[in-house]
Image (cartoon, grey):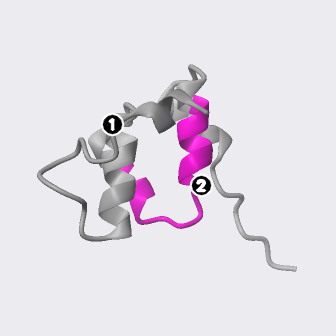
């Protein structure tokens, strides 16, 4: 179990977020990601939220975690 999993489920506001992107943004901001970056990552399904949070829980800076898990550019074959 990571440290992130031990945090309360609803600390981001007055109740549960209304959609998945809001929930993802909330979790990223709580983990220390800058607001703008969290907003961008929250709507991009290519980023594995749990993998990002796990790296941060292990001490990786958020910006480096994003670089490590950045999706590869698509290549035409």
Q: Residues within 10 Å of mark 2 (few under 14, many from 20)?
A: some
Give the mark nearer the N terminus: 2 vs 1: 1
Quick check: is 30 in the magenta stretch?
A: no
Closer to the camera in the image, 36 or 32: 32
Q: Which mark is residue 30?
A: 1
Q: Residue at x 34, y 52 (%)?
A: 25
Q: Is residue 58 above or below residue 77?
A: above
Q: Residue at x 65, y 46 (%)?
A: 69
- Identify the residue at the far right of this view: 77
Q: Position of residue 70 (x, y in %)?
A: 63, 50
Closer to the camera in the image, 46 or 53: 53
Q: How many marks?
A: 2
Q: Is residue 74 above or below residue 40?
A: below
Q: Residues within 10 Å of mark 1 (few under 14, many from 20)?
A: some
Magenta stretch: helix, strand or loop mostly: helix
**Magenta span:** 38-55
Q: Which mark is residue 48?
A: 2
Quadrant of res 6: top left
Closer to the camera in the image, 73 or 59: 59
């Amino acid at each position: 179990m990571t440290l992130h999993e031990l945090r309360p489920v609803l600390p981001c506001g007055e109740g549960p977020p209304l959609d998945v992107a809001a929930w993802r943004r909330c979790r990223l901001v709580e983990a220390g990601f800058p607001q703008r970056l969290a907003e961008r990552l929250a709507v991009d399904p290519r980023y594995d939220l749990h993998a990002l949070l796990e790296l941060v829980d292990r001490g990786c800076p958020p910006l480096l975690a994003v670089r490590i898990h950045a999706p590869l550019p698509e290549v035409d074959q």
